Amino acid sequence: MWEWYHSQQLFAICVHRHIYIPLGGSRRGQFRRTFASLMCFAYVCLWHGMWRHVVFWVGANFVGVTLEAFGDHMCNMPQFRRFEVRFVGSALFRLKVIALRVHTSELPAIWDHTVLPAT
């Protein structure tokens, strides 16, 4: 397990350093960022083999990364910021506070060893 994890980390670093960055990475605009991501995922697909499950996994990850980058790009636009401040700001803040409160209120029960059954 330890060797597998570190070999996967090394593979990801090499793909990032030798494919993503030379193709422009995230510093040359949205189109170049998407193209660089596509080339990285195509390389990963070729590296692992062109089986259906690998192609599906790589395609799903590429779509997820692309949607995340597009959402990040949209959230940084001034029009979206004005819309967020005007219509969503307070409601989104309240939702974040409620979500954080629910998770943090359960932590003491999870970490308290007296609640867990003795083994």
Image (cartoon, grey):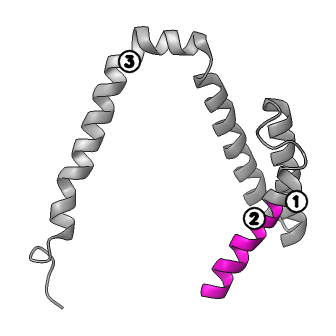
Residue assigned mark 1: 18
Q: Please give the range of residues in magenta.
A: 1-15
Residue count near mark 2 (Cα–Cα under 10 Å), binned few <14, some 14–19, many ≥20: few
Is 109 magenta? The answer is no
Residue sitting at x 60%, y 23%: 76
Q: Earlier in the sequence, mark 2 or mark 1?
A: 2
Q: Classify mark 3: helix, strand or loop.
A: helix
For the image shown, how many numbered marks are present on the structure? 3
Side (left or right) of 42 relative to 54 = right
Give how far apart the Cα atoms at labels 3 and 2 are: 37 Å
Residue count near mark 3 (Cα–Cα under 10 Å), binned few <14, some 14–19, many ≥20: few
Q: Amino acid at mark 3?
A: Gly
Q: Amino acid at mark 2?
A: Ile
Side (left or right) of 1 relative to 53 = left
Q: Classify mark 2: helix, strand or loop.
A: helix
Q: Judge whether 82 appears above or below 13 on screen.
A: above
Measured as percent of width and height from the top left, residue 46 is found at 90, 65
Mark toward the viewer: 3 or 2: 2
Q: Amino acid at mark 1?
A: His
Residue assigned mark 3: 89
Measured as percent of width and height from the top left, residue 85 is found at 43, 13
Give how far apart the Cα atoms at labels 3 and 1 are: 41 Å
Q: Earlier in the sequence, mark 3 or mark 2?
A: 2
Give how far apart the Cα atoms at labels 2 and 1 are: 8 Å
Q: Nearer the viewer, residue 15 or 46?
A: 15
Residue assigned mark 2: 13
Measured as percent of width and height from the top left, residue 98 is found at 25, 36
| Residue 1 visible (yes or no) | no
